Amino acid sequence: MSTVSGRGLEKWFTRKEDPLVVTPLLSHRQIGESSLDVRLGNQFIVFRTHRFGIFEAIGTSTSVQPRRSQERQVIPFGDRLALHPGVLVLGCTFEYVSMPSDLECQVEGRSSWARLGLQVATASSVEPGFKGVITLELSNVGTVPLTLMPGIRIAQLVFREVKPPVYNPYSGSRKYRCPIGPEFSRLQDDYDWVTFSRK
Amino acid sequence: MKSLPFSQADEDAWHETLRRRELRRCLISLAQLADTVQFTEDFVIETPTILARLIRVTAELLARGIDTTARNQDLEQINTVLGIITPHLRYVERAQISQTPWSIVQSAERLLKLAVGSESHFIIRPSWAYNYSVIGEFASVYREILSCWPWFNIDEWKEQVGLKNNESIYCISFPRIEKANCLLHANWGHEVGHILVARWVAADFGTVWTADESQMKRRIEDQMKKNPPSVDPLFKDMVIQEAVAEQMRATMEVARQGLIELLCDRVGIHLLGPAALAATMEYAARFAMDISPLQSSNYPPWRYRLRKMFEHCEPDLKDYTGVGYPNIEIAEYLEWLKVGSRLSAASTDLDVIKSSIITKEAYEFVSRHWEKAAEKVIAMLPPALARPYRMHENHDVIGKLVLRLKQGIPPNEIAHLSGQPASFQDILVAAWAYKIHKITKNPGWGNSDEYDLLFRLVLKGCESSYVHLTWGDKIDGEKL
């Protein structure tokens, strides 16, 4: 697999069948030499730490607990989100992405933000065939609070060609179908949780 | 021990003291509640906080007035005002981001403001009743009530509220259970129509009614004389006159309400084209088509309303083969609309209308004045919205947006990397075209996952298009 350059993406953007879509791109400058900048969306999931002691991904209340322990927040464009040191917030890209069957991408932080202590993604691979906004795990590992605004360039996508194209794109996991905001953790849907769970 | 009755003066003094203390306490509580809502809740647009401020400032200044300048004889009125304005806070509370389809609220507000003027502000909130409605206007009512009291410092109130004299606040409601169903929210076009139509009613309805009144009265009288009430001949004329007056009053109400609803439909369809028509059809399908206005709070029969809407949509229901209309993406939607238009071919609603002299006269009045009234109401729209939205003029764009929906991509821009965000109207029409396409291909289409996906894509499309339109050109000045 080799990284696709900004110019190289043209082929995927313009082809009729199974194109790459990143929409909307507010500026052409988002397409860099070897990556594509994406902007911060306005939906967030914050943890309601006061509502639970330990997060149990499996158990009698597995389908309920993630929702009880997390809360959606919308910060309108023009407003700000303060991210305090040590806090994890789920955000998402403003751009909606439709990945073709022969491309995958990695979500990487921008160095300008990284130098302030912002990490944007840990589960950073976006599979061929994925459609939706990309969930970002935003955490401030620095020592000073950071102000984030929906619409700012927050991360970059680095594309790699997949050869041969995957047969059944994004079929391995349909847990996150066409999301338009960050998704609650669905760890409980993992097929192997029960296997390792001692009754 | 038996207590002695108050003297009147003592009782008045006792009453006043208690009243002032309790009113003051309630007004301060209301101001605090409004303050909490204004500053702690999240809203996607500014209007809810403006209404909260209006309520807070009003309550604060009334509380201060009670302490100082308010006259005793005004206390009962202040109590009435308190009773009126307190529930207004629920409009603010329910407009929180989490309660609304916030992704389309900004786009919708932009269109509504464009239609009735930027000095109008809108709150969009859910109601548990299954109904779309518009409430207001709030600011002028507050101003009018408060100006009645000479002791109330209206200038200070105006300064603190921060609204100019021509600024107004309306609240548009939608059914709570339809929160995500952004396709049905095309009904907001009808609701904003109420604001324009109210202006027409205030300016013109009285004049046109008066011009026709005597002839209508004569016909109703003639009808009455043919079937006179069986009373003592001594009282016959008097009873007839009373009955005629009653029927004239009823006729005017039916005619007025009929015109209002029909004109609002016209505004809705003018702004949103076949999206408004489809939304009205789906909404109307819950009810009988031919209910007499006399049995439905003077509302016109649904068939009559839809017929008027179809008449206006006529240019969109034709085929323009020369320009490839309809294209493949909207052909099924157009066919569905054409089938729907057969509803208006039946005349059962007209039979119901003709069956009573009241509705017959009222709807003849509506017919006589319909064209001119519609023209006048549409003329109130700004030049940017003077032309009606036509699907056949936008079919190319709509087709592209439908294609995106089919591919699981939000319909926010005309083509990928085009740098051209789609309009709110185009997005809604495309959403309807996509939905009808899915239903046509598979009548069983429409489980909750399928609807959920459609709604999500359309909501995201509206939001992205709004951001693109608002900030796109400002982002380092470089167009794609």
Image (spheres, coloured by chain):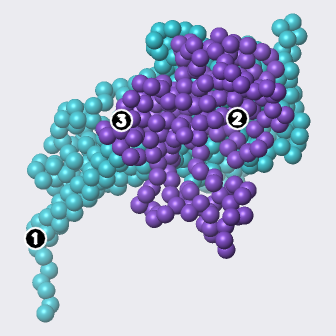
Chain colours: A purple, B cyan
Q: Are marks 1 and 3 in contact (CB under 8 Å)?
A: no
The subunit letter for the residue under badge 3 reads A
Which residue sits furthest top?
A: B322
Q: Nearer the viewer, residue B419 or A91?
A: A91
- Between the C-alphas of marks 1 and 3, the distance is 65 Å
Tell me the tag on residue A146. 3
**In the rendered image, residues at marks 1 and 3 fall on the same chain:** no
Left or right placement of residue B391 versus residue B320 in this view: left
Choose the circle earlier in sequence order: 3 or 2: 2
Q: Which residue is under mark 1?
A: B10
Which residue sits furthest front?
A: A1
Q: Amino acid at mark 2?
A: Glu
Q: Amino acid at mark 1?
A: Asp
Q: Quadrant of the C terminus of chain B?
A: top right
- Which marked residue is nearer to the observer: mark 1 or mark 3? 3
The subunit letter for the residue under badge 2 reads A
- Which marked residue is nearer to the observer: mark 2 or mark 1? 2
- Vertical position of residue B239 compared to residue B329: above or below: below
Mark 1 is surrounded, within 10 Å at the Cα level, by few (under 14), some (14 to 19) or many (20 or more) other residues, namely few
Q: Nearer the viewer, residue B3 or A22?
A: A22
Q: Which residue is under mark 2?
A: A127
As helix, strand or loop, the secondary structure at mark 3 comes to: strand
